[in-house]
Amino acid sequence: MSYPRRMPLYPFLRPLIFALDAERAHRLTVAALKRLPPGLPPETDAVLATQVAGIDFPNPIGVAAGFDKDGEVWRQMLGFGFGFVEMGTLTPRPQAGNPKPRLFRLAEDRAVINSMGFNNQGFDAAEARLAARRSALAQLDFKFSGRKSRRFGINIGANKDSVDRIADYVEGVRRFRQRAAYLAINISSPNTPGLRALQDEEALRELLAAIGEARFDTKLDGRLPRIFLKVAPDLAPADVDGIAKAAIDHHVDALIVANTTVSRPPLRSRFAGESGGLSGQPLKALALERLRDVRRATGGALPLIAAGGIASGADAYERISAGASLVQLYTALVYEGPGLARRINGELKALLRRDGFARLDEAVGTAPL
């Protein structure tokens, strides 16, 4: 079902939610969402619908990884008007993550700092959960290059104590290649020591070559999984160029720009000094700048997905004009609530029409570099 549009309750609930520790509030939110019936994807909108890597999306607004770590409520999130949901990050073995407290709301800055550390139940639990819901998933299928798939992606990471992180990613590709519309390779979290070193061009090429072997292994099945690569906003221009070349050479299907930042622009909150990745409004300018850099480096050869500081239709439109075909959000949900997707889609549609675009893809990359 698509959840009915009622008077927004979130502004009244938010003070109660914010009175709780941030991580506890998130756990309670997921628990509450699990009590809702599965949501149906929104109807395809002729103006907002788009296709990326052969995948049809009814609108470009998605839930970023981190919200639904273990794939428990992605179907419910579709009912709030999101075009797609990215579950995860999942690691091969279950992982408790970093010590608590590790999630902080910076309300004055409309931001969040997290040092979660890929806490999740692992591949086995996620695979079992998806298999158990196979009959329900079939009702949500949509076309994927002539075949059927689901309106969600799976974000894959490596265990903190892994002796072979490349093998972790390869296992994820092999395990979930038939389970999702796309697989997002997360090498950009700042909360797993050394993980971002995989963004160095030589290391990245080694990783993508290994993933390619699993991806194109015809002995597994006939389906070619779509591979997206998620990169950090804290990249130097030379890093961006190297990542772009490696991604193109190894047939990555799209780049997600970007993850959280370890930089600290001026912040007002008392939590400003906490370690971890910063997301939300303070990330907006940096994420937009990096998107432009990646667009310039790829020359339009790869679809781009924007994340970081997106909270309105104007924000989404700015990223689309800068080269993104899809956008993702998470932190804005903390401050705006579940009605955000429908609001952004409505605002975005009005902006496209204002500027004479009949379809979203006509606006992609129209802003000058």
Image (cartoon, rainbow, N blue to C red):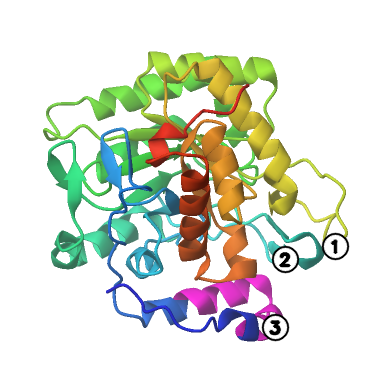
Which comes before the other along the chain, label 1 or label 2?
A: 2
- Disc number lying in front (3 or 1): 3
Q: Which residue is mark 2?
A: 105
Image point (55%, 47%), residue name: 316
The mark total stands at 3
Is residue 64 something one can see in this rendering? no
Asked if labels 3 and 2 touch by Cβ distance under 8 angstroms, the answer is no
Q: Position of residue 244 (x, y in %)?
A: 51, 19
Question: Amino acid under label 1?
Answer: Ser
Answer left or right for 156 relative to 277. Answer: left
Q: Which residue is mark 3?
A: 15
Would you say residue 28 sits in the magenta stretch? yes
Question: Amino acid under label 3?
Answer: Pro
Q: Residue 239: which quarter of the image?
A: top right
Real-space CA distance between mark 1 and mark 2, rounded to the nearest whole angstrom: 9 Å
Q: Which residues are magenta?
A: 13-30
Is residue 288 something one can see in this rendering? yes
